[in-house]
Amino acid sequence: MADQAVHTRRRGAPQQELVHRFSGSERIVHWLFAADIVALLISGLGLWLPPNLNPVIDHRDALRTVHLDAALAMLAIVIPALSRGAPLNALWRDVEWFSREDWQWLGRIFVPARWRRDPLPPQGRFNAGQKLNTIAIAAATVGFVVTGAVMWQGERLPSSLALAADTWHLWLMWLIIPLIVGHIVLALVLPSTRPAMRGILFGAVRLDFARRRHARWVGETPAADRESSTEEPPTGGAAS
């Protein structure tokens, strides 16, 4: 990629090389999408909880407005980002194709390292697990939009169709919550994957981390696209 560059930070301590992983537009879309998903989940839970367990039951009309506005905001974020050359369009090209190495990675990742006969195959900018997560989130988003539109117009449609849409909307919520929780745990909690968080915050990740986790992607980065620069140390804990 033209914007992939290796940076070196110097500040008394040993130099640390960084490789650019996400563009500014990719990071903006990610955080807008994440904030909107949180707003949709919180408002959706407030609309779903039964009256005896719902602390915001007196504000259902406001929650419904927030939920609908957040749904419209989702469309405003996603549709332009899918246009030709836009961030999600480029991301989709990275995740839509599974190579033989990706399938091998999926077959080995759940085997503890000490019992694994063969090492994990080198991965691209996104490993096979991240590809699956992205595809699942994308499918759930489409499902939310379709079922939400049916629910919104439920009074004008057959009651059986509106009820089915409501049921699927709820099931999609229970599907997406563990995906989001797992995503957050990998980004913030597990030491082996926590360095990836730097990329979605600042654009670049440690080169040693990228070589361990995304060796094929690093190997495909043209040498001509690499340069040296001085950067401030990243905030937060780093891990192996």
Image: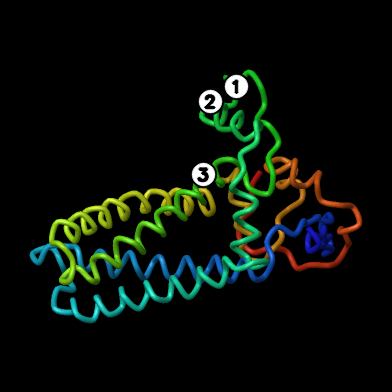
* Badge 2 vs badge 1, beta-carbon distance below 8 Å: yes
x, y percent for residue 63: 25, 76
Mark 1 belongs to which amino acid?
Arg
Would residue 184 be found to the left or right of residue 11 on screen? left
What residue is at 47 percent from the left and 54 percent from the top?
184
* Badge 2 vs badge 3, beta-carbon distance below 8 Å: no
Q: In the rendered view of the protein, which quadrant contains the N terminus?
A: bottom right
How dense is the environment of label 2, judged by Cα within 10 Å: few (below 14), some, or many (20 and up)? few
x, y percent for residue 38: 39, 66
Among the 4 quarters of the image, the one containing residue 73: bottom left
Q: Secondary structure at mark 1?
A: loop
What residue is at 71 percent from the left and 46 percent from the top?
209
Residue sitting at the far left: 52
Above or below — where is 122 with respect to 34? above
Q: Which residue position holds label 1?
A: 116
Among the two numbered marks 2 and 3 on one chain, the one whose residue lies closer to the N terminus: 2
Q: CA distance from mark 2 to mark 1?
A: 6 Å
Q: Which residue position holds label 2?
A: 111
Q: Secondary structure at mark 2?
A: loop
x, y percent for residue 235: 64, 64
Residue sitting at the far right: 224
Mark 2 belongs to which amino acid?
Val
Q: Which is more toward the observer, 205 or 232?
A: 205
How dense is the environment of label 3, judged by Cα within 10 Å: few (below 14), some, or many (20 and up)? some
